Image: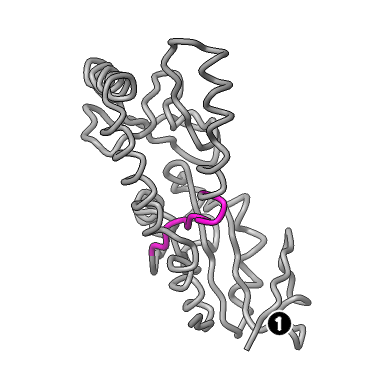
């Protein structure tokens, strides 16, 4: 059995009542101003349904308490998102990480040699760091501290307006410098080890192939993929 997917900026009661609507899946930021429009349709909906969310910090609790968001159930895109929502009493029923389109990833690998050469010609001996992500303050781009998976020395919250608190993780500057020196040394002086790191990165990415990862998400709306 196949399904057609229709993308909409807002899901209404009319959309839910349509005979050809089998299931409803919301993709949204887990903040009051973004989720408010989903509250009534979600509660009203008696068809398979799920809300898949992300967030960059902790929602401000007074906003959540004054809303109906605690009545909904959420699927978080990361453990970070899940923990932030649980802090303010929002119910997280699962964590499904973002998937990787390996077809696009393999095409990128095959076509990157020209881009790499262009960067080498343009920036010569400078260290080039490729960052794939949004320029969000929490990402730490000014310090080149992209939320590493290593221990941080400090965690602090910073108000991001009326909606949420950003969580910032500070890493020791000497640690960051040591990591960068090591990366530069490997790239320039040990091509074999650099190639092995590239291979391991692709192998790791394959674990998050969206064809595997999103099967779990689809199960929440009663869709089984063989």
Above or below: residue 29 compared with residue 162: below
Task: Please indicate whether residue 178 sits to the left or right of residue 137 in the image.
Answer: left
Q: Residue at x 40, y 22 (%)?
A: 144
Q: In this picture, which residue range is highlighted in magenta? A: 95-105
Indicate whether 4 appears above or below 20: above
Percent position (x, y) of residue 60? Answer: 46, 44
Q: Which residue is mark 1?
A: 21
Going 47% across and 73% down the picture, which residue do you hit? 215
Is 65 part of what is drawn in magenta?
no
- Is 122 placed above or below 43 here? above
- Towards the viewer: 9 or 148: 148
Classify residue 117 by image quadrant.
top right
Residue in the picture at 57% in, 39% down: 111
Asked whether, in this view, residue 114 is left or right of residue 181, the answer is right
Q: Residue at x 38, y 56 (%)?
A: 82
Q: Is 209 or 142 nearer to us in this picture?
A: 209
Taking the magenta stretch, the answer to whether it contains residue 104 is yes
User: Which percent across, then down, holds residue 145?
Assistant: 36, 26
Say what secondary structure mark 1 lies in.
Answer: loop
Q: Position of residue 79 (x, y in %)?
A: 34, 53
Query: Which quadrant, please, contains the N terminus?
Result: bottom right
Q: Residue 17 in the image: x percent, y percent?
A: 74, 83
Q: How is the image coloured?
A: one colour
Q: Tell me the quarter of the picture where residue 152 sits.
A: top left
Neighbourhood count class around disc 1 (C-alpha, 10 Å): few under 14, some 14–19, many 20 upward: some
């Amino acid at each position: 059995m196949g399904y057609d997917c229709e993308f909409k900026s807002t899901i209404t009661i009319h959309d839910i009542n349509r005979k050809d609507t089998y299931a409803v899946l919301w993709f949204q930021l887990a903040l009051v101003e973004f989720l408010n429009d989903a509250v009534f349709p979600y509660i009203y909906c008696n068809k398979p349904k799920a809300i898949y969310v992300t967030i960059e910090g902790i929602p401000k609790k007074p906003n959540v308490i004054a809303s109906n968001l605690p009545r909904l159930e959420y699927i978080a895109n990361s453990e970070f998102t899940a923990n932030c929502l649980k802090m303010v009493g929002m119910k997280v029923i699962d964590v499904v990480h973002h998937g990787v389109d390996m077809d696009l990833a393999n095409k990128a690998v095959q076509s990157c040699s020209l881009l790499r050469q262009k960067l080498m010609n343009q920036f010569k001996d400078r260290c080039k760091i490729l960052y794939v992500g949004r320029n969000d303050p929490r990402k730490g781009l000014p310090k080149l501290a992209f939320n590493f998976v290593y221990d941080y020395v400090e965690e602090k919250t910073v108000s991001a307006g009326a909606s949420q608190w950003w969580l910032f993780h500070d890493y020791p500057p000497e640690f960051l410098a040591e990591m960068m020196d090591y990366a530069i040394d490997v790239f320039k002086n040990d091509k074999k080890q650099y190639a092995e790191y590239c291979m391991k990165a692709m192998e790791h990415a394959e674990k998050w192939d969206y064809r595997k990862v999103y099967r779990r998400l689809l199960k929440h709306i009663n869709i089984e993929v063989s």
